[in-house]
Image: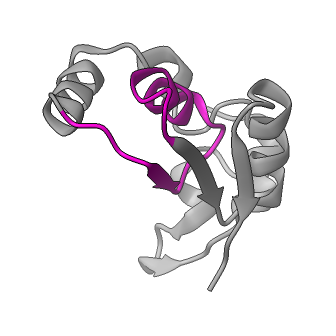
Amino acid sequence: MTAGKYPSCTEYWLNTEDMTFRGEFEAMYGDIEDPWGCAAVVDSLNNRLFLDLVFHEREFAGILDVGCGLGAFTKKVQERQPQARVAGCDISATAVRKAKAAYPEIDFFVLDT
């Protein structure tokens, strides 16, 4: 449960009554500290396996995390590929502002097209 506008984070982006896209990401990131729960699972086995599969014996010059949210996973990517220019983008200016504050060494920006 949230203390915000809707009873769950899902309802900020989806109207569960008629299953239409609501897209209220600014309100969601303003009302809920970590709406997707990413900070709690950033070191999960699934994430570690994903990073191992993607980056095993590979080095990239640049990496863009689309839908970076609060940036915790983007930071993990940057740690795995320290030689790369790592950036994150999200539709929510609030999420990007919070990501920049948490990880100032990473380039985060808003993209909504």
Looking at the image, which is closer to me, 82 or 65? 82
Q: Residue at x 43, y 48 (%)?
A: 61
Q: Residue at x 69, y 52 (%)?
A: 6
Answer whether residue 98 is visible to the viewer in this image. Answer: yes
Q: Residue at x 74, y 47 (%)?
A: 95
Residue 66: in magenta span: yes
Looking at the picture, how far across and down is residue 48, in whole percent?
Answer: 26, 19
Q: Is residue 93 left or right of residue 73?
A: right
Q: Which residues are magenta?
A: 58-84
Residue 47: in magenta span: no
- Quadrant where the N terminus is found in the figure: top right
Looking at the image, which is closer to me, 51 or 9? 51
From this view, report whether residue 27 is shown above or below residue 113.
Answer: above
- Quadrant where the C terminus is found in the figure: bottom right
Q: Residue at x 51, y 30 (%)?
A: 78
Looking at the picture, how far across and down is residue 32, in whole percent?
Answer: 73, 36
